[in-house]
Image (cartoon, grey):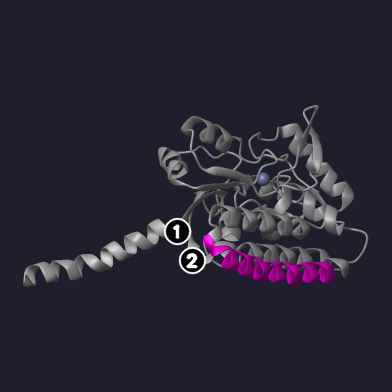
């Protein structure tokens, strides 16, 4: 009897923690920014698996067998949409997961660009905070629908998170609004900041297009260097998801100043850009320092 009791007391904490994990809503997000937004709204009620991790490039991501297993365990899958993660659509189809798939960017008015004769949507909508607000609404609605028992918590967390985003929006308006008119041209590795540029009147140039998949040709890099020289571009920025060599070469040959690193398509593993609002604030201050200089 005593042996049984000891055994029972040993097993009890284990079975409780397993039960708690099983109670949580299993959510898969395609990349780190959506994982953080979902964590902010979902709090302790969600168990999140993010397929593309911090500092990783979602454009060129190749799913693993573990990703397929995560989709099969999930009750909710949250993707960006706007053509950002075509590999996820293929994985959802091939696994035939019963999970609900939602698009966080739903409702965003897409910026479209012509690339190789085709009009394609710009997927990087999160860099405009007015769009991030839509993301938070869509994620909150999806969590409530998947787990209505915790509706009040999701709505309260979502509202608190939106307040933080509104504060950041006011800070961005004040800082970008205070930048000198005139030269507001900068260069990044790929064309990830179009929505930010559109919202605040900053012109972003890049050797690579909307996706990082295609490497630029020598002629395209040379044309950009000429453009940087002629336009008097203020600064060239590296990106956390990209090898910096090409950008350093462009800075060297054009004589442009390197303004630092911007966080484009992923959070950082640690430090100030390890949450989405931290990422936005870091980029805001880095751009402000580069463009505000006389
Ligand atoms: Zn990108």
Magenta-drawn stretch, dominant element (helix, strand or loop):
helix
Give yes or no for contact between labels 1 and 2 (Cβ–Cβ under 8 Å). yes
Residue 285 image-quadrant placement: bottom right
Instruction: Name above or below for residue 155 compared with residue 247.
Output: below
Q: Residues within 10 Å of mark 1 (few under 14, many from 20)?
A: some
Question: How many numbered marks appear?
Answer: 2
**Residue on which the image places disc 1:** 24
Instruction: Name above or below for residue 237 compared with residue 250.
Output: below
Most distant residue in the top direction: 117
Residue 126 image-quadrant placement: bottom right
Report helix, strand or loop for mark 1. loop
Magenta part of the protein: which range? 149-175
Most distant residue in the right direction: 182
Quarter in which the N terminus is drawn = bottom left
Q: Nearer the viewer, residue 3 or 247?
A: 3
Instruction: Name above or below for residue 105 compared with residue 133.
Output: above
Residue 151 seen in the current view: yes
């Amino acid at each position: 009897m005593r042996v049984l009791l000891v055994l029972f007391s040993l097993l009890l904490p284990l079975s409780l923690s397993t039960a708690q994990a099983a109670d949580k809503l299993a959510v898969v997000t395609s990349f780190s920014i959506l994982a953080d937004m979902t964590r902010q709204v979902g709090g302790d009620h969600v168990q999140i698996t993010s397929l593309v991790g911090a500092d990783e490039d979602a454009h060129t991501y190749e799913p693993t067998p573990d990703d397929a297993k995560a989709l099969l365990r999930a009750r909710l899958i949250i993707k960006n949409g706007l053509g950002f993660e075509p590999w996820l659509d293929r994985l959802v189809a091939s696994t035939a997961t019963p999970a609900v798939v939602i698009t966080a960017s739903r409702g965003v008015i897409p910026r479209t660009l012509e690339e190789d004769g085709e009009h394609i949507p710009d997927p990087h909508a999160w860099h405009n905070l007015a769009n991030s607000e839509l993301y938070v609404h869509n994620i909150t609605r999806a969590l409530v629908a998947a787990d209505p028992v915790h509706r009040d918590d999701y709505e309260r967390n979502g509202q608190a998170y939106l307040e933080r985003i509104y504060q950041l929006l006011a800070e961005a308006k004040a800082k970008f609004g205070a930048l000198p008119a005139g030269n507001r041209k900068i260069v990044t590795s790929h064309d990830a900041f179009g929505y930010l540029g559109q919202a605040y009147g900053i012109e972003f140039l890049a050797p690579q297009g909307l996706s990082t998949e295609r490497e630029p040709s020598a002629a395209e890099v040379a044309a950009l260097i000429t453009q940087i020289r002629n336009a008097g571009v203020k600064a060239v920025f590296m990106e956390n998801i990209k090898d910096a060599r090409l950008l350093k070469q462009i800075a060297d040959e054009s004589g442009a100043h390197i303004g630092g690193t911007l966080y484009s398509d992923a959070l950082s593993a640690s430090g100030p850009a390890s949450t989405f609002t931290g990422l936005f604030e870091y980029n805001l201050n880095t751009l402000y320092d580069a463009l505000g200089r006389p």
